[in-house]
Every structure is written in structure tokens, then in C-alpha cells.
Amino acid sequence: MTKRIVIQAALFAALATGVASAQKILINAAGATFPYPMYSKWFDEYHKKFPNLQFNYQSIGSGGGINQATQGTVDFGASDGPMNDKQLQEFRNKRGFGILHFPTVMGADVPVYNVAGVNTDLNFTPEALAGIFLGKITKWNDPELMKANPGAKLPATDIIVVHRSDGSGTTYIWTDYLSKVSKEWETKVGRGTSVNWPVGLGGKGNEGVSGQVQQTPNSIGYVELIYAVQNKMKTGKVKNLGGNFVQASLAGVTAAAASSKEMPDDFRVSITNAPGKDAYPISSFTWLLIPEKIADANKKKAIKDFLVWMLSDGQKMTEALAYAPLPKTVIAKEQKAIAKIQ
Amino acid sequence: MAATSTTVASAGPSRPAPSFVQRLRSGDQIAHLITFGAAVVVLLITAWLVFELYTNSVLSRNKFGWKFLFTSTWDPVAGEFGALPFIYGTTVTAALSLLLAIPLGVGAAIFLAELAPPRISDALTFLIELLAAVPSVIIGLLGVFVLIPILRTVEPSIRAVLGWTPLFQGPFYGVSVFSAGVVLAIMIVPFIISISREIILSVPGDQREAALALGATRWETTWDVVVPYARKGIMGSIFLALARALGETMAVTMVIGNDPKIKASLFAPGYSIAAVIANEFTEATGDLYTGALIELGLVLFGLTILINAVARLLVVSTTSQGSAR
């Protein structure tokens, strides 16, 4: 009891001196919804460490994050897809300096399905996934699927495709992967947070897609890995560039980032279809978008310190929330890049 | 009431015309000002809304022009935007929901107002008004997990009877324009019932007595005298229901299938304007894309006005020929 009082007194003293020495700093940020649980955990932990520092993160979506960072209404943004060259130019025109990408954690998309009489994990080749989502493979007993799944009793029924109806980073990763493995997909549909789907029904959010798949016999869709893990869903294995069918896992996602060819200096890289035997091919980074110049010295220091902490202590918290941590090589590179913030 | 009596008192012949201050004090002018202000504010909000939608959709309007309304490609990657599938989906789901909800709603309102014992009527009306207060996301969830499985089981019988029409062909995935219409009908029926019932109850008793005195049966009185008398009010309730059906977002997007294609079959998935805006706005990158979504908002606004105007014209043309009012 007395010990607790002493601690409380010490805390009060620390707080009082803290308040006296440094004024409160509020840092506003907005963007991606996918890493929101991770970010709010980080910002909360960091706030506990430095009570005078508070982050206010609005998970309004990647598009909104990019817009608000460009407009300068937030101190930094966050996005599931890297900003494209046009968006970078827009930022530069508007603000007079550039913006930096910092990968924070990784996520992945997994195929989920509901096929009558199939209880095993199905194997999917890239050709099968592209074919199904292009509307070219229309039956579950298509040779492409039969070949990859010897022994599975695939019915001769129509495949019903379910995709996301809301714009989302999850869709970006999925279409980015399909664009890489299928020329036809790249030219006909392309990559984006929303695309012009050749076939299929739209479900709103991960829960909408998984609900639709569970409700509709002989359907296939895709959801965010974390969502599938938390809901203990049966997921398909996907064939990677190394020729193995891999089940999505946090380790597989980190492996994809590690085996991914050279990391560019601006970190704007897609790691879908990464080489490597263990790499799960439909993986992606999510990024913080931090302006090169931050006028307020206090804020600048706070953001830089936070990045350092996020890359060390912060990374240890990722797996508890089912996010894949960054590989060491990427962390080392990011630590150097922090100095670019002026 | 107080205002009326003071006006009457001050309007005596011997007194000079009351000054502005006097009238202000009597409350008449104040009431006038306040109500006028309220009306103006509502109009201003509407005008402001249109103005904002108009200015913010400039990129999309300039690029696509009127073509926006008549093309059906919606490709955010290529930057091609056409509103036709959404306009179609919105109109068809709203029409279908009215088709189902009007007979149900008006029928229930007549029963509750004219035929049911007052006690049952009050209890039932209370329950029906509760239905109107259910959040649309809950209705949407019920649609996905309860209604669609039910529709799946009745679908073969619908197909057996109406399958020869192009409206009920092709595979049925559960989510469809048809499901959206049914869900919308459930959402709007309470509006029609509760308002129509009030209107029917407010029909003067001597109308009924006169009809009965002429030897009409109870049903003839209700159908030939009371309902025509209340027609305008019932129409009003239907307009309100229609507005709700056109603008409903959450429940529709959960059951319509979100596929921007125009298919004749009601069993096929579709998409509505409100649903696509809600789905894509947060992640819309690029000014043209956002502009196109905002222009869709403008289109929905125009569509609502247009449909309301047409409906109102219909009412005027039918009520002018010999209704009780």
C-alpha cells in the first residue's frame, strides 16, 4: 500500500515537472484503416511513455490520408498503397518539398471459399486466381484447379466471385498481385483501391465479403489475413514464385518482404509475388507518409523519436495484434531514412 | 391562440393602425419573423447543398458532360465514369419497394384506422413505429442473415410462376436488386402506415355518417368516401417513403450485390447511387474520381426532384377530377 502511494507521488512529481518543462504537443494524423488497431496501440503506448505527447489518428482511409497530408491539414498521413508519381508531384507543387514513405507493418490477403463437399485447404495457382477473377475459369472442376488439387472432390458447379465493394487497401493488394501474375488482368482491369471488376458480387468490408462467401455456396472471395486469423477462417494456399503452395502466415509475410528484391530508397515498393521459397505472395507494406519538412521543431523531434521507437520497441508489439513485423533489413534502412526529415 | 385573440382585439375600428413595435409586442410579427426565418434557412441549406455538389464536381462534369448520365462504365483505374447503372439500380429498387409497400402500407393503415378496435390499433401502431426506428444497418444485417435465406427458399416458386418474364431469369445469388427492393419495402412501410393512419383518422366523422346514412356499407364508406378524402395525405406518406427508398444506403449496399451492371432480371445483382458513394468515397484517390462521386450525389438529388415532381403531377391530375377535396 505504501509502495503504491510512493509510486503515485513519484508519478505526480514527474507529471508536474513534465508539464512545467514541456508544453503539450498534439500531433494529428489520418489515413489507412487497415493498420489502425496497430497505430492506436502504438500511439497509446507512446503517450504513456511521454504523457505530454499525444497522437490523434483518424482512420479515414488511405485516399483521405494522402489528401489530408497533401493539403497539410494533418502532420502526417498513412496509406496502404504507396503514393504514385502524380500524387508525389502534386504534394511537391502544393507544399514546396517532398514526402517520405515509412513502412510500419505488413499485411496480406488470403483467398476464402465455400465449396460444397470440400473440407481440405485448396491450392490456388496464380493462373487459377487470375482466371477466376477475370471470369475465364467459371467451374470449380476446371482443369487448372483440378491439377493443383489432386484428391479434392471439386464439384462441376459455377464459381461465384465475391470482392470488396468499398474502396480498400485490401483490394489494392489483391489487384496488384493479379496485375503482376496476369498480363490480361493488368491491361483489362489494373490495380487500385476500387476497380472495374469483370465478374462478381461486392461485399462491404472484410465482414461483408466473408459473410457473403459463407452464405453463398460455391463462392470465392478474399479477405485481409488478420481478419481471417481472428475469425479462424479456412483459407486457401497460394503458389509462390518459388513453386510452393504456402498458407498465409505472419512469418510468410515477413519472408516476402525480406526476399523482395532491392528495397528502393523511398520505400515505395510492392512486395506482392515476391521470390523466395517461404514468401507468401499476396503481401504488402503499409506506410506512414511523413513530410520532408516539419516547421514546428517540437513536432519534428516528436515524430522522429516516435519513428525510432516504432522501429525498435514498437515492432515487438505487432504479432500480438496479428500484424507481420518488418524484416531487419528494412528496419535498418528506415532508421537511416529518418535523418531525411528536416 | 393568444396571438389570434390579440390581433382581433387590436383590430377595433376606433384605434389607429398599430405601429410596428406594437405589432411586435403583440407577438404576431415575431411569429411571422421566426417562421419566415425557419423557412428561409431550410431553403438556404438546400441551395447550399446543391451549390457545393455542383462546384465540387466540376472536374467530372467538364470531362464527361451529359455523357455521364448515359454511359455505364465505372472504372476508377482508367478514370472512366458513367452513372447509368447506378441511376438504374436506384430507380428500380425504389420502384419495386413502393410496389410492395404501398398495398401493404395503405391496407394496414385502413385496417388500423377504420376497422380495428382502438386498443389493438394503438398497440399495433406503436409497434409499427418502432420498426421505423430500427437503424438501417440492423435491417441490412437481418436482410443478409434472415431475409436472403428465406428468399432463397421462395425463389423457385417465384420463378415457377413468373419465370417466363425477363424480370425473373438468370441465377439467383441471394444478394440482388430483388432482395434490395424487399428490404427497402420493409423499411418504408412503417412510414406509409403511420402517416396514412393519422390522415385517415383525421377524416371528419360526418363524412362517414353521411355515407352510412345514404345506405353505404362500412367497407363502401371506407373505400369510396374516407380513403378518397384522405388521398392527398396518403400520397404525402408515399412521397416520404419514396424519398427514404431513394436515399437509403447501408441496408441497400448489404443486399444489392454492388455490381454496376444493368440487367433486366431482378434476380441479378445491381448497385445504387447512395451505395456506391458510401462504398467508394473514403478511398477515392484523385480529384476526378472524387468529382465523379460528388456528381453522383448531384444526380441523386436531381433524380429525387424529378421523381417527386412526376409523382406530384400524377397526384394533381388524379385529385382534380372529383375527389372530396
Image (spheres, rainbow, N blue to C red):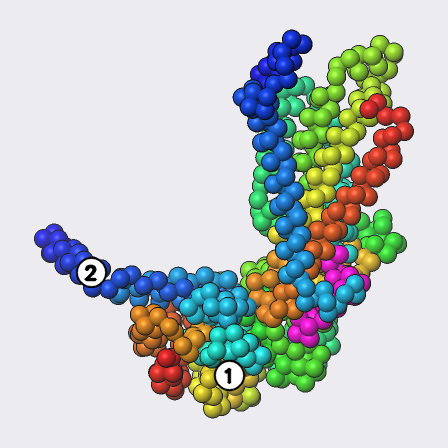
Residue B81 falls within the magenta-colored stretch: yes
**Would you identify the image quadrant in which residue A164 lies?**
bottom right
Chain-order first, disc 1 or disc 2: 2
The residue lying at 46 percent from left, 65 percent from top is A73
Answer above or below: position of B319 versus B55.
Answer: above
Q: Nearer the viewer, residue B249 or A138?
A: B249
Q: What span is in magenta?
A: B68-87
The x, y position of residue B127, in whole percent, is 60, 31
| Amino acid type at mark 1 | Val
Would you call the spot at circle 2 few (<14 residues within 10 Å), some (14-19), or many (20 or more)? few
Among all residues in the image, which is located at the extreme left?
A2
Kindly identify which residue carries mark 2: A20
Task: Indicate the chain on which mark 1 is placed.
Answer: A
| Marks 1 and 2 in Cβ contact (< 8 Å) | no
In this view, the residue in front, A93 or B173, is A93
Image vertical order of residue B252 relative to residue A311, above or below: above
Distance, label 1 to label 2, CA atoms, is 44 Å
| Chain name for mark 2 | A
Check the picture and name the quadrant holding the C terminus of chain B.
Answer: top right
Q: Look at 70% across and 82% down and name the residue there.
A: A187
Q: Position of residue B180 (x, y in %)?
A: 70, 51
> In the rendered image, is residue A157 in sight?
no
Q: Position of residue B24 (x, y in %)?
A: 56, 24
Q: Secondary structure at mark 2?
A: helix
Which residue: 65% across, 69% down? B288
The quadrant in which residue B240 appears is top right
Q: Which residue is mark 1?
A: A269
Amino acid bearing label 2: Ala
